[in-house]
Image (cartoon, helix red, strand yellow):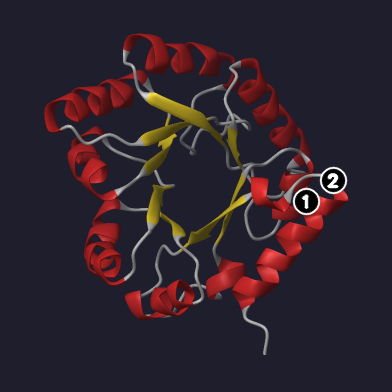
Amino acid sequence: MTSKLIKIKEKIKAAAQLSSRNPEDITLVAVSKIHTAQTIIEVLKEGQRIFGENRVQEAAQKWPALKEQFSGVVLHLIGPLQSNKVRQALSLFDVIETVDRPKLARAIARISMETGEVCDIYIQVNTGLESQKAGVAPEQADALIALCQDELKLSVKGVMCIPPEGEDPVKHFKLLKEIAQRNKLSVISMGMSGDFESAIEHGATHVRVGTAIFGSRPSH
């Protein structure tokens, strides 16, 4: 039986080739939030090393032991980050995808300087201007990127977005790509289980896939 992970990698490859892109230029972030260490181990054994978690606390319970067991793990924070969790996040994560406000960026810069722990950051853009969702407004993204790069000297690698549910994601993908290109950022993190092929067509460099790899949320 072909594993779910292999199927997703095949779909990524096919989507890349359809758009005349090199499949090697697309990074799969396996979203392991809400899944147990045991479930994650199965995917680690298949060779996947890049994972996304939503909550600092949950990641702290699972990943230190998994990182000891499997080398080369790269962990992305893909959920909202509160300023009071920055210290813990910097010790756990290699990439913070959800920097969306100056206060958070300043906290990351300050604590990085203090502890020597640095990580790459992506700017989260609220492309749908949804009030309940984190992310900087598109028209304020350039200013936040400039603050992070020029004043705070953070390692800004890219941008990310989560398009509104029930809307065609394409216009959101196009908007995020425009912001990345305008700011000369090489990473565009967009696309999830339901729309990653479309995201690849529109320039995604990183796709965040959970359900299609791990199955649906485990029932408690």
Query: SS class of the residue under badge 2?
Result: loop
Query: SS class of the residue under badge 1?
Result: helix
Where, quadrant-wise, is the N terminus in this rendering?
Answer: bottom right
What is the x, y in percent for residue 149? 41, 16
Where, quadrant-wise, is the C terminus in this rendering?
Answer: bottom left
**Of all residues shown, which one is farthest toward the bottom?**
1
Determine which residue is flagged by label 1: 16
Residue placed at 35% from the left, 45% from the top?
Answer: 94
Left or right of residue 184: residue 172: right
Q: Are marks 1 and 2 in contact (CB under 8 Å)?
A: yes
Tell me the kind of residue under disc 2: Ser
Residue 199 image-quadrant placement: top right
Residue placed at 54% from the left, 64% from the top?
Answer: 210
Q: Which of the numbered marks, if any, corresponds to residue 19? A: 2
Residue placed at 36% from the left, 75% from the top?
Answer: 36
Nearest the viewer among 37 and 57 is 37
